[in-house]
Image (spheres, rainbow, N blue to C red):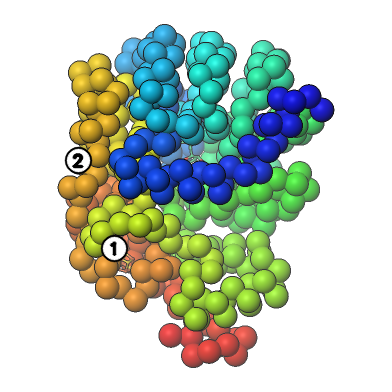
Amino acid sequence: MDVEKLINRAVVNTEPMFSAYLHSRGNAAGVPVSATFELTARCNFNCKMCYVHLQDSALCKSQEKSAQWWIDLGKKAIEQGVVFLLITGGEPLLREDFPEIYTELSKLGFIISINTNGYLITDKIVELFKKNPPTRLNISLYGASNKTYENVTGVPAFSRVVENVKNLKKMGIDIRFNGSFTSLNAEDSEAILNISRELNTHVKGTQYMFPQVLVGGKPGENPCRLSPEEAARKRVEWLKLIYTPEEFEKRLKAMVDGVDAFRLSCDEECGEGKVRCRAGKSSAWINYRGEMCFCGVAGHPFSIDEYGFDGAWKKVKEFSASIRTPAKCENCKYRNICCVCAAACYTETGNFSTVPEYVCRMTENIAQLMKNEVERLGIGNGN
Ligand SMILES: C[S@@+](CC[C@H](N)C(=O)[O-])C[C@H]1O[C@@H](n2cnc3c(N)ncnc32)[C@H](O)[C@@H]1O
Ligand code: SF4
Ligand code: SF4
């Protein structure tokens, strides 16, 4: 194995620890340790729950930034301290100039991950990744059959995506699956997990889907997402699938003792009522129009052409620090098992300080289902 591959493997293995350390330093110092470049909002799929690709494709294309713009932005991002770069979309591989953007950004020394639906892995992309592998590819798996894929994405793409994954894995590329569950594919959860096990690839299952944010920033519907009750049921079922019965019981016991043993919440160090994740503290999101936001779904953009990278980052930081999340969440007994975040508040209710009812209902149901499990296994009192 050549040195570059060895180094890449070492980075993959140590990345979570390294990332947690740098982000905590970044949070304290207000340095953007990670950035997301959303190269496009266009997509070759048409997923019914997607919050990104709702706009008119031609209009999106006309608003996109050029390859050179993203490469120049990469240089500014490195100067400001960005180490981890996530390239996403829409579907980033849909851009014809993706190879140029990727190649130039890689030369700058970022640790690069790419979010993709895994369909457009052409020979050209295979060659590109052979020469210069990303640290990680996050591939969304939308079903366990062509039929489910067609229901969710409009394209019967299952066989092709799996084939692509197998080829990429043969090349030694680190792949993680994302499973986003809605009423259209939740029945495939177990089959998706089995496929991920067969392919020896970790899968992260998400049962909470944000509402779609329509043009104009208004909170929208998301007609195909699960009801809060169903999302809770699927969440607990998922936890029982991904852990062995012994591990599930061990984690349940730890949860009864007050430990966030299922990592259901994602708190960072923060003050009361403030944004709990890294958004606008050590991470920045740059959308396809070239605007910096504190997070991908909750909007509030600042134009980089107007403020520059560092100026936009200052604005994003100030904005993130000014957000006050619901007081009720601070003292809530379910806080440790609730996935509430500033973005969920905003997209569900139109403002950051109102409790999102959907999330509350989902969490209360998770709590009840966990309590049932505690009683079934005779552990603690289940409160
Ligand atoms: C927007 S896609 C962009 C990258 C690529 N096209 C893909 O599908 O992975 C990134 C991730 O967001 C998820 N996603 C889409 N709509 C969502 C929503 N309303 N709430 C939560 N996640 C969503 C997708 O399933 C995917 O895993
Ligand atoms: S593949 Fe990704 S960007 Fe495309 S529609 Fe689906 S979720 Fe949205
Ligand atoms: S359950 Fe409701 S009140 Fe409690 S933390 Fe979650 S969103 Fe906030």
Q: Secondary structure at mark 1?
A: helix
In this view, the residue in front, 233 or 245, is 245
Callout 2 amino acid: Glu
x and y percentages locating residue 160 in the rendered image: 70, 30
Q: Give whichever of 322, 364 is nearer the camera.
A: 322
Q: Is residue 365 above or below residue 54?
A: below
Q: Circle 1: is it few (<14), some (14-19), or many (20+) Cα within 10 Å?
A: few
How many marks overall?
2
Q: Is residue 192 above or below residue 72?
A: below
User: The C terminus appears in which quarter of the rendering?
Assistant: bottom left
Choose mark 2 or mark 1, whichever is in front.
2
Q: Residue at x 56, y 53 (%)?
A: 205
Q: Is residue 64 visible?
A: yes
Q: Which residue is mark 1?
A: 357
Q: Residue at x 57, y 80 (%)?
A: 253
Where does the image place residue 265, in percent across and percent down from the top left? 43, 61
Disc 2, SS:
helix
How far apart are labels 2 and 1 at the CA level?
27 Å
Name the residue carrying label 2: 318
**Disc number placed over residue 161 in the picture, else none:** none
**Residue 40 found in image quarter:** top left
- Residue 28 horizontal/vertical position (percent): 33, 47
How packed is label 2: few (under 14 Cα within 10 Å), some, or many (20 or more)? Answer: some
